[in-house]
């Protein structure tokens, strides 16, 4: 079993994170409970920034907040000198309430509403990542109404597929995201943007997928992009001020995963850009967008073990007080995780369990065939690497309240998102007679 970040085992055999006993966290804050190792997030952020600073080029490392967004997390990103990606009005609102510097906010999304664009223009955010011609035209119109000029990156699909799950491939030609490079859409979009008065075209953006464990895909994407950039530079003088190469850097979920050090990705990107530039072209500012790779391994989810069901000669089920309501990824992506019994860390992991959630769905299984210590009702289970897309995808299926979120650092625990209550679940419900809308 692999321990992450500041995790250790205490003398009494309990798992600790950030100097705090996870069993005590479960007792104090209840379960299911998201716990984040703040020191580990800081370490990851500094590793990305240091990789760029060693190369002495202009850059931005933007935290992709869709991975995990709350006010405290956005403030932590600001403390570490990161920029910020948002993909909705809600994520933008959270960033504004957190006091994040607006000039370092980048707004993504393939279908930004008019209201969301107006909100972002009013806030004077740093950049829009434009996904299609409809949005480009709408942004020009709304910026003209407000008398402002919007910075823009054009998201492109370079036709490079990362080796990852089909549901999260985004760099291929047949994608809902971005302008297609090979069909000529990107060139048309560049010329359209350059002809607009209220749009300032900063450059290009691409994102080729998620959970990428090699640099080849990034290298191929850059080579593909520059094969076109060289032609555009010669024919109409276009070169990007900014080249955003996205994220997707892999993390460790199980022992089968072998993520690269972050500098491997950054070094390969910078080296390839430099080698592909033709004479007269300037080095663009390089932006990247780590999300999962900043927070994924830093998060664990704590559960309380409940019922136990054994199917003779077939399966040994162990149920916990959470599941697809707090971690949708196993049901959605068939994602795999590792776990431990946090109050029995010195005992051998010689029992094979399949960890079931409590939702009324046969597909609500967190981990199939997991080697764990002997577990009984009331034990604390910790599932590792749940820091990305757990809280973000949390839901109220079966009317389960969403868990609390706790940050731990230097022996202290801070509640940063309170647990929902049953009262919260019905807060927006209306009685039948009041719900009838009069003509």
Image (spheres, rainbow, N blue to C red):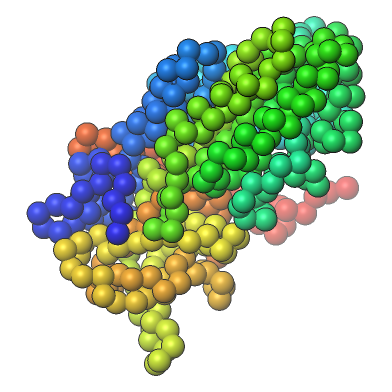
Q: Nearer the viewer, residue 300 or 156?
A: 156
Can residue 221 be seen by looking at this rendering?
yes
Q: Quadrant of residue 405?
A: top left
Task: For the N terminus, give its image quadrant.
Answer: bottom left
Asked if residue 147 lies left or right of residue 321, the reply is right
* Residue 148 rendering spot, x and y as whole percentages: 76, 8
Q: Nearer the viewer, residue 69 or 332?
A: 332
Looking at the image, residue 340 lies above or below residue 384: below
Q: Is residue 227 above or below residue 36?
A: above
Q: How many marks?
A: 0
Q: Is residue 402 left or right of residue 89?
A: left
Q: Is residue 212 left or right of residue 299?
A: right
The single residue placed furthest to the bottom in the displayed view is: 312
> 20 and 199: which one is in front?
199
Quadrant in the picture for residue 95? top right
Splitting the image into 4 quarters, where does residue 367 fall? bottom left
Residue 292, x across and y down, in percent: 50, 42
Residue positioned 81% across, 47% down in the render: 174
416 left or right of 290 in image: left
In the rendering, at what x and y percent does residue 340 appear? 30, 62
In this orientation, does residue 64 appear? Answer: no
Q: Residue at x 67, y 36 (%)?
A: 220
**Residue shown at 21%/48% (left/top)?**
8
Q: Is residue 241 above or below residue 254?
A: above
């Amino acid at each position: 079993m692999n321990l992450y970040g500041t995790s250790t085992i205490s003398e009494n055999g309990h798992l600790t994170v950030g100097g705090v006993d996870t069993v005590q966290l479960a007792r104090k804050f209840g379960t299911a409970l998201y716990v984040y190792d703040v020191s580990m997030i800081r370490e990851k952020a500094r590793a990305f920034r240091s990789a760029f600073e060693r190369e002495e080029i202009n850059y931005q490392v933007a935290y992709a907040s869709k991975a995990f967004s709350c006010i405290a997390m956005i403030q932590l990103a600001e403390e570490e000198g990161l920029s910020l990606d948002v993909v909705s009005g809600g994520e933008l609102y959270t960033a504004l309430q957190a006091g994040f510097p607006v000039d370092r906010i980048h707004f993504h999304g393939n279908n930004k509403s008019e209201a969301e664009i107006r909100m972002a223009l009013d806030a004077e955010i740093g950049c829009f990542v434009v996904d299609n011609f409809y949005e480009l035209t709408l942004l020009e119109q709304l910026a003209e109404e407000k008398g402002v000029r919007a910075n823009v990156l054009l998201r492109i699909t370079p036709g490079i597929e990362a080796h990852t799950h089909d549901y999260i491939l985004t760099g291929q030609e047949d994608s809902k995201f971005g302008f297609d490079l090979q069909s000529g859409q990107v060139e048309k979009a560049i010329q359209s943007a350059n002809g607009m008065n209220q749009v300032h075209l900063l450059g290009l953006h691409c994102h080729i997928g998620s959970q990428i464990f090699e640099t080849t895909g990034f290298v191929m994407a850059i080579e593909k992009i520059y094969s076109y950039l060289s032609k555009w530079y010669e024919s109409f003088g276009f070169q990007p001020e900014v080249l955003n190469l996205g994220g997707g850097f892999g993390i460790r979920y199980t022992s089968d995963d072998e993520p690269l050090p972050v500098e491997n990705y950054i070094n390969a990107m910078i080296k390839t850009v430099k080698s592909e530039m033709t004479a007269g072209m300037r080095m663009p500012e390089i932006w990247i967008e780590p999300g999962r790779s900043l927070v994924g391994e830093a998060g664990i989810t704590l559960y309380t073990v409940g019922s136990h069901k054994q199917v003779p000669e077939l399966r040994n089920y162990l149920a916990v007080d959470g599941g697809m309501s707090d971690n949708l990824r196993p049901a959605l992506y068939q994602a795999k995780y590792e776990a431990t019994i946090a109050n029995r860390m010195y005992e051998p992991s010689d029992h094979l369990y399949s960890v079931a959630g409590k939702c009324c769905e046969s597909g609500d299984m967190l981990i199939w065939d997991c080697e764990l210590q002997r577990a009984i009702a009331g034990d604390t289970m910790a599932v590792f690497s749940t820091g990305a897309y757990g809280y973000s995808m949390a839901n109220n299926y079966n009317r389960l309240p969403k868990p609390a979120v706790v940050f731990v650092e230097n022996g202290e625990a801070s509640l940063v998102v309170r647990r929902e209550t049953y009262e919260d679940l019905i807060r927006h419900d209306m009685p039948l007679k009041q719900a009838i809308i009069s003509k």
